[in-house]
Protein backbone atom coordinates (compact mmCIF):
# COMPACT_ATOMS: atom_id res chain seq x y z
CA UNK A 1 0.00 0.00 0.00
CA UNK A 2 1.44 3.34 -1.07
CA UNK A 3 1.01 5.83 1.74
CA UNK A 4 -2.20 6.17 3.71
CA UNK A 5 -4.59 5.53 0.88
CA UNK A 6 -7.72 6.96 2.42
CA UNK A 7 -10.84 5.51 0.85
CA UNK A 8 -11.98 8.55 -1.15
CA UNK A 9 -15.24 6.99 -2.28
CA UNK A 10 -18.18 8.91 -0.80
CA UNK A 11 -21.26 10.01 -2.71
CA UNK A 12 -19.44 12.20 -5.27
CA UNK A 13 -17.33 11.49 -8.37
CA UNK A 14 -14.72 9.65 -6.26
CA UNK A 15 -17.13 6.72 -6.08
CA UNK A 16 -16.32 5.84 -9.72
CA UNK A 17 -12.52 5.84 -9.70
CA UNK A 18 -10.91 3.65 -7.01
CA UNK A 19 -9.86 0.10 -7.84
CA UNK A 20 -11.12 -2.62 -5.51
CA UNK A 21 -8.54 -4.49 -3.48
CA UNK A 22 -7.76 -8.00 -4.68
CA UNK A 23 -8.74 -9.92 -1.54
CA UNK A 24 -12.33 -11.07 -1.15
CA UNK A 25 -14.40 -8.51 0.79
CA UNK A 26 -17.66 -6.57 0.89
CA UNK A 27 -16.67 -3.19 2.32
CA UNK A 28 -13.76 -0.71 2.20
CA UNK A 29 -14.10 1.73 5.09
CA UNK A 30 -12.29 4.72 6.56
CA UNK A 31 -12.95 6.22 9.99
CA UNK A 32 -11.13 9.10 11.63
CA UNK A 33 -12.45 10.51 14.88
CA UNK A 34 -10.38 13.32 16.41
CA UNK A 35 -10.64 15.71 19.32
CA UNK A 36 -9.66 19.36 19.30
CA UNK A 37 -8.77 19.83 22.97
CA UNK A 38 -10.80 22.49 24.74
CA UNK A 39 -9.20 25.73 25.86
CA UNK A 40 -9.51 29.51 25.69
CA UNK A 41 -8.37 31.60 22.76
CA UNK A 42 -6.78 35.05 22.83
CA UNK A 43 -10.22 36.70 23.19
CA UNK A 44 -11.19 34.53 26.12
CA UNK A 45 -13.63 32.37 24.13
CA UNK A 46 -13.72 28.68 25.05
CA UNK A 47 -13.35 26.29 22.10
CA UNK A 48 -13.15 22.54 21.64
CA UNK A 49 -14.47 20.13 19.02
CA UNK A 50 -15.11 16.49 18.16
CA UNK A 51 -14.83 15.60 14.47
CA UNK A 52 -15.61 12.15 13.02
CA UNK A 53 -15.26 11.43 9.30
CA UNK A 54 -16.61 8.00 8.32
CA UNK A 55 -16.83 6.97 4.68
CA UNK A 56 -16.47 4.03 2.35
CA UNK A 57 -18.04 1.83 -0.29
CA UNK A 58 -19.56 -1.61 -0.53
CA UNK A 59 -20.46 -4.33 -3.06
CA UNK A 60 -22.84 -7.26 -3.02
CA UNK A 61 -20.42 -10.03 -4.09
CA UNK A 62 -17.34 -10.29 -1.88
CA UNK A 63 -15.48 -12.38 -4.52
CA UNK A 64 -16.06 -9.97 -7.42
CA UNK A 65 -13.06 -7.63 -7.84
CA UNK A 66 -14.72 -5.87 -10.80
CA UNK A 67 -18.38 -5.38 -9.82
CA UNK A 68 -20.88 -3.87 -12.24
CA UNK A 69 -22.72 -2.09 -9.42
CA UNK A 70 -21.71 -0.88 -5.94
CA UNK A 71 -22.56 1.69 -3.30
CA UNK A 72 -20.93 4.39 -1.22
CA UNK A 73 -21.64 6.24 2.00
CA UNK A 74 -20.41 9.10 4.16
CA UNK A 75 -21.16 10.13 7.74
CA UNK A 76 -19.51 13.35 8.93
CA UNK A 77 -20.16 14.55 12.48
CA UNK A 78 -18.80 17.75 14.02
CA UNK A 79 -19.61 18.80 17.59
CA UNK A 80 -18.29 22.21 18.62
CA UNK A 81 -18.01 23.19 22.27
CA UNK A 82 -17.80 26.95 22.58
CA UNK A 83 -19.41 29.97 24.20
CA UNK A 84 -19.36 31.75 20.82
CA UNK A 85 -22.86 32.80 19.75
CA UNK A 86 -23.76 30.53 16.81
CA UNK A 87 -22.24 27.06 16.99
CA UNK A 88 -24.44 25.41 19.58
CA UNK A 89 -25.74 22.31 17.76
CA UNK A 90 -24.03 19.29 16.26
CA UNK A 91 -23.32 19.37 12.52
CA UNK A 92 -24.01 16.36 10.28
CA UNK A 93 -23.42 15.44 6.62
CA UNK A 94 -24.83 11.97 5.91
CA UNK A 95 -25.24 10.47 2.46
CA UNK A 96 -25.75 7.26 0.50
CA UNK A 97 -25.11 6.63 -3.21
CA UNK A 98 -25.15 3.86 -5.81
CA UNK A 99 -22.86 3.52 -8.81
CA UNK A 100 -22.45 1.22 -11.76
CA UNK A 101 -21.13 0.52 -15.23
CA UNK A 102 -23.70 1.39 -17.89
CA UNK A 103 -21.97 -0.12 -20.91
CA UNK A 104 -19.37 0.45 -23.58
CA UNK A 105 -18.94 3.42 -25.92
CA UNK A 106 -16.85 2.16 -28.76
CA UNK A 107 -13.39 0.68 -28.44
CA UNK A 108 -11.80 1.01 -24.97
CA UNK A 109 -14.49 3.42 -23.69
CA UNK A 110 -16.89 2.61 -20.85
CA UNK A 111 -19.74 4.66 -19.41
CA UNK A 112 -20.17 4.82 -15.63
CA UNK A 113 -22.56 6.76 -13.42
CA UNK A 114 -23.38 7.36 -9.77
CA UNK A 115 -26.21 9.06 -7.94
CA UNK A 116 -27.01 9.69 -4.32
CA UNK A 117 -28.81 11.78 -1.77
CA UNK A 118 -27.57 13.32 1.46
CA UNK A 119 -28.45 15.78 4.19
CA UNK A 120 -26.09 18.39 5.64
CA UNK A 121 -27.77 19.95 8.67
CA UNK A 122 -27.23 21.48 12.08
CA UNK A 123 -29.04 18.75 13.97
CA UNK A 124 -32.48 19.45 12.46
CA UNK A 125 -32.95 16.39 10.23
CA UNK A 126 -36.47 17.54 9.37
CA UNK A 127 -35.02 20.53 7.48
CA UNK A 128 -35.76 19.79 3.82
CA UNK A 129 -33.44 22.62 2.71
CA UNK A 130 -30.56 20.46 4.00
CA UNK A 131 -31.31 17.56 1.62
CA UNK A 132 -29.21 17.61 -1.54
CA UNK A 133 -28.47 15.34 -4.53
CA UNK A 134 -25.10 14.24 -5.89
CA UNK A 135 -24.57 12.67 -9.31
CA UNK A 136 -21.79 11.91 -11.79
CA UNK A 137 -21.67 10.55 -15.34
CA UNK A 138 -18.22 9.69 -16.71
CA UNK A 139 -16.90 8.14 -19.93
CA UNK A 140 -13.63 6.37 -19.17
CA UNK A 141 -11.10 5.60 -21.88
CA UNK A 142 -8.43 2.98 -21.21
CA UNK A 143 -5.35 4.25 -23.00
CA UNK A 144 -3.06 1.48 -21.76
CA UNK A 145 -3.14 -1.22 -19.10
CA UNK A 146 -2.77 1.27 -16.20
CA UNK A 147 -3.51 4.54 -17.96
CA UNK A 148 -6.97 6.14 -18.15
CA UNK A 149 -8.74 9.29 -19.31
CA UNK A 150 -12.05 10.32 -17.72
CA UNK A 151 -14.48 12.81 -19.29
CA UNK A 152 -17.86 13.69 -17.84
CA UNK A 153 -19.91 15.90 -15.57
CA UNK A 154 -20.52 15.89 -11.81
CA UNK A 155 -22.93 17.67 -9.49
CA UNK A 156 -22.67 18.16 -5.72
CA UNK A 157 -25.66 19.99 -4.25
CA UNK A 158 -23.70 20.84 -1.10
CA UNK A 159 -20.51 22.09 -2.74
CA UNK A 160 -18.73 24.77 -0.74
CA UNK A 161 -18.55 26.95 -3.87
CA UNK A 162 -21.45 27.47 -6.32
CA UNK A 163 -23.47 24.47 -5.11
CA UNK A 164 -26.06 24.79 -7.89
CA UNK A 165 -23.55 24.44 -10.73
CA UNK A 166 -22.62 21.15 -12.48
CA UNK A 167 -18.87 20.75 -12.99
CA UNK A 168 -16.87 19.08 -15.75
CA UNK A 169 -14.77 16.00 -15.04
CA UNK A 170 -11.52 15.99 -17.04
CA UNK A 171 -8.92 13.72 -15.45
CA UNK A 172 -5.93 11.73 -16.62
CA UNK A 173 -4.69 8.92 -14.39
CA UNK A 174 -1.64 6.69 -14.80
CA UNK A 175 0.60 4.32 -12.86
CA UNK A 176 4.26 4.76 -13.80
CA UNK A 177 5.86 1.65 -12.38
CA UNK A 178 5.81 0.64 -8.70
CA UNK A 179 6.86 4.07 -7.35
CA UNK A 180 4.63 6.68 -9.03
CA UNK A 181 0.90 7.06 -9.46
CA UNK A 182 -0.72 10.33 -10.43
CA UNK A 183 -4.08 11.83 -11.30
CA UNK A 184 -4.20 15.20 -13.04
CA UNK A 185 -7.13 17.35 -14.06
CA UNK A 186 -10.37 18.65 -12.58
CA UNK A 187 -11.95 18.42 -10.02
CA UNK A 188 -9.21 16.24 -8.47
CA UNK A 189 -5.43 16.07 -8.65
CA UNK A 190 -3.26 13.58 -6.79
CA UNK A 191 0.33 12.31 -6.78
CA UNK A 192 1.64 9.27 -4.91
CA UNK A 193 5.40 8.77 -4.92
CA UNK A 194 7.73 6.27 -3.29
CA UNK A 195 11.32 7.58 -3.61
CA UNK A 196 12.66 4.63 -1.60
CA UNK A 197 11.01 1.32 -0.67
CA UNK A 198 10.44 2.44 2.92
CA UNK A 199 9.25 6.00 2.18
CA UNK A 200 5.86 7.00 0.69
CA UNK A 201 4.54 10.48 -0.11
CA UNK A 202 1.06 11.56 -1.18
CA UNK A 203 -0.30 14.97 -2.22
CA UNK A 204 -3.98 15.52 -3.04
CA UNK A 205 -6.00 18.59 -4.09
CA UNK A 206 -9.76 18.73 -4.61
CA UNK A 207 -12.13 21.44 -5.86
CA UNK A 208 -12.68 24.02 -4.55
CA UNK A 209 -10.01 24.37 -1.82
CA UNK A 210 -9.44 21.04 -0.02
CA UNK A 211 -5.89 19.67 0.08
CA UNK A 212 -3.88 17.03 1.94
CA UNK A 213 -0.23 15.97 2.22
CA UNK A 214 0.76 12.65 3.76
CA UNK A 215 4.24 11.22 4.22
CA UNK A 216 5.35 8.07 6.02
CA UNK A 217 8.36 5.86 6.72
CA UNK A 218 8.18 2.09 7.18
CA UNK A 219 10.17 1.16 10.32
CA UNK A 220 9.45 -2.58 10.16
CA UNK A 221 7.16 -5.18 11.76
CA UNK A 222 4.10 -3.44 10.31
CA UNK A 223 4.83 -0.09 11.97
CA UNK A 224 5.15 3.22 10.12
CA UNK A 225 5.87 6.76 11.26
CA UNK A 226 3.81 9.37 9.44
CA UNK A 227 3.00 13.04 9.19
CA UNK A 228 -0.03 14.69 7.61
CA UNK A 229 -1.17 18.24 6.86
CA UNK A 230 -4.73 18.88 5.69
CA UNK A 231 -7.08 21.71 4.79
CA UNK A 232 -10.82 21.06 4.50
CA UNK A 233 -14.04 23.06 4.52
CA UNK A 234 -17.52 21.62 5.10
CA UNK A 235 -20.94 23.26 4.86
CA UNK A 236 -24.14 22.53 6.79
CA UNK A 237 -27.61 24.05 6.39
CA UNK A 238 -29.00 26.00 9.32
CA UNK A 239 -32.57 25.53 10.45
CA UNK A 240 -34.88 28.34 9.28
CA UNK A 241 -32.02 30.02 7.36
CA UNK A 242 -33.11 29.23 3.80
CA UNK A 243 -30.14 28.63 1.52
CA UNK A 244 -27.58 29.94 4.03
CA UNK A 245 -25.19 27.46 5.60
CA UNK A 246 -22.68 27.34 8.43
CA UNK A 247 -19.16 26.45 7.26
CA UNK A 248 -16.32 24.91 9.25
CA UNK A 249 -12.81 25.50 7.92
CA UNK A 250 -10.12 23.30 9.49
CA UNK A 251 -6.36 23.16 9.06
CA UNK A 252 -4.62 20.26 10.80
CA UNK A 253 -0.98 19.23 11.13
CA UNK A 254 -0.27 15.91 12.84
CA UNK A 255 2.18 13.10 13.23
CA UNK A 256 2.00 9.64 14.69
CA UNK A 257 2.37 5.89 14.43
CA UNK A 258 0.56 3.63 11.98
CA UNK A 259 0.25 -0.17 12.27
CA UNK A 260 -0.67 -2.19 9.18
CA UNK A 261 -1.28 -5.92 8.86
CA UNK A 262 -3.51 -8.08 6.66
CA UNK A 263 -6.37 -7.67 9.17
CA UNK A 264 -6.03 -4.14 10.56
CA UNK A 265 -4.80 -0.66 9.59
CA UNK A 266 -4.86 1.72 12.54
CA UNK A 267 -3.10 5.01 13.28
CA UNK A 268 -2.72 7.10 16.43
CA UNK A 269 -1.62 10.69 16.03
CA UNK A 270 -1.40 14.06 17.69
CA UNK A 271 -0.85 17.54 16.41
CA UNK A 272 -2.26 21.00 16.02
CA UNK A 273 -5.24 22.74 14.44
CA UNK A 274 -4.57 26.24 13.12
CA UNK A 275 -6.14 28.96 10.99
CA UNK A 276 -9.60 27.58 11.75
CA UNK A 277 -12.81 29.48 11.07
CA UNK A 278 -16.56 29.07 11.46
CA UNK A 279 -18.74 31.35 9.31
CA UNK A 280 -22.16 31.60 7.68
CA UNK A 281 -23.36 32.44 4.17
CA UNK A 282 -24.61 30.94 0.91
CA UNK A 283 -21.16 29.60 -0.05
CA UNK A 284 -17.54 30.04 0.97
CA UNK A 285 -17.32 33.48 -0.63
CA UNK A 286 -19.65 34.93 2.01
CA UNK A 287 -18.66 35.55 5.62
CA UNK A 288 -21.74 37.03 7.21
CA UNK A 289 -20.76 35.96 10.72
CA UNK A 290 -17.27 34.79 11.55
CA UNK A 291 -15.67 33.09 14.54
CA UNK A 292 -11.95 32.33 14.56
CA UNK A 293 -11.23 30.03 17.51
CA UNK A 294 -7.43 30.15 17.41
CA UNK A 295 -4.91 27.33 17.44
CA UNK A 296 -5.58 24.22 19.53
CA UNK A 297 -3.91 20.79 20.06
CA UNK A 298 -5.61 17.68 18.69
CA UNK A 299 -5.47 13.88 19.01
CA UNK A 300 -6.77 11.43 16.39
CA UNK A 301 -7.44 7.74 15.77
CA UNK A 302 -7.66 6.50 12.17
CA UNK A 303 -8.97 3.05 11.24
CA UNK A 304 -9.13 1.70 7.68
CA UNK A 305 -10.92 -1.59 7.21
CA UNK A 306 -11.60 -4.23 4.58
CA UNK A 307 -14.18 -6.82 5.51
Image: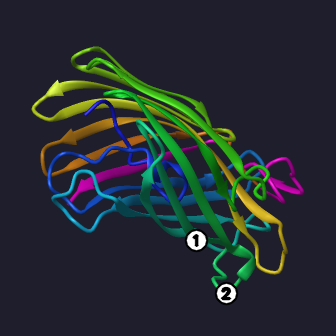
Q: Which residue is mark 2?
A: 126
- Closer mark to the observer between disc 1 and disc 2: 1
Read off the magenta span: 279-307
Q: For this view, does 219 lie left or right of residue 114? A: left
Between marks 1 and 2, how big is the CA–CA gap? 15 Å
Quick check: 140 above or below 62? above
Q: Residue at 55% of width from left, 33% of height from top?
A: 171
Is 194 in the magenta?
no
7 vs 296, nearest the viewer: 7
Quick check: 221 above or below 236? above
Q: Secondary structure at mark 2?
A: loop
Say which mark, if any, is on residue 117: 1
Is 284 in the magenta?
yes
80 vs 69, nearest the viewer: 69
Q: How far across and down, in percent of the image, does residue 77 sit?
A: 53, 66
Q: Secondary structure at mark 1?
A: strand
Amino acid sequence: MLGALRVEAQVDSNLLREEWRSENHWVDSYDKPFFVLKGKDADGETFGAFHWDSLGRFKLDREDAHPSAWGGYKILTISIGTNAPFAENGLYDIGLAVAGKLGRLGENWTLEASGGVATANDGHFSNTEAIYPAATVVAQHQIAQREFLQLGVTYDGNSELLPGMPLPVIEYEAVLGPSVKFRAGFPHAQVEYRPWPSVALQLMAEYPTNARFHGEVDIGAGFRLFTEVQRRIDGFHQDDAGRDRVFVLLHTAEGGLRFVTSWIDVSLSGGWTFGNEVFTGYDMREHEQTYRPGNRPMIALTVQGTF
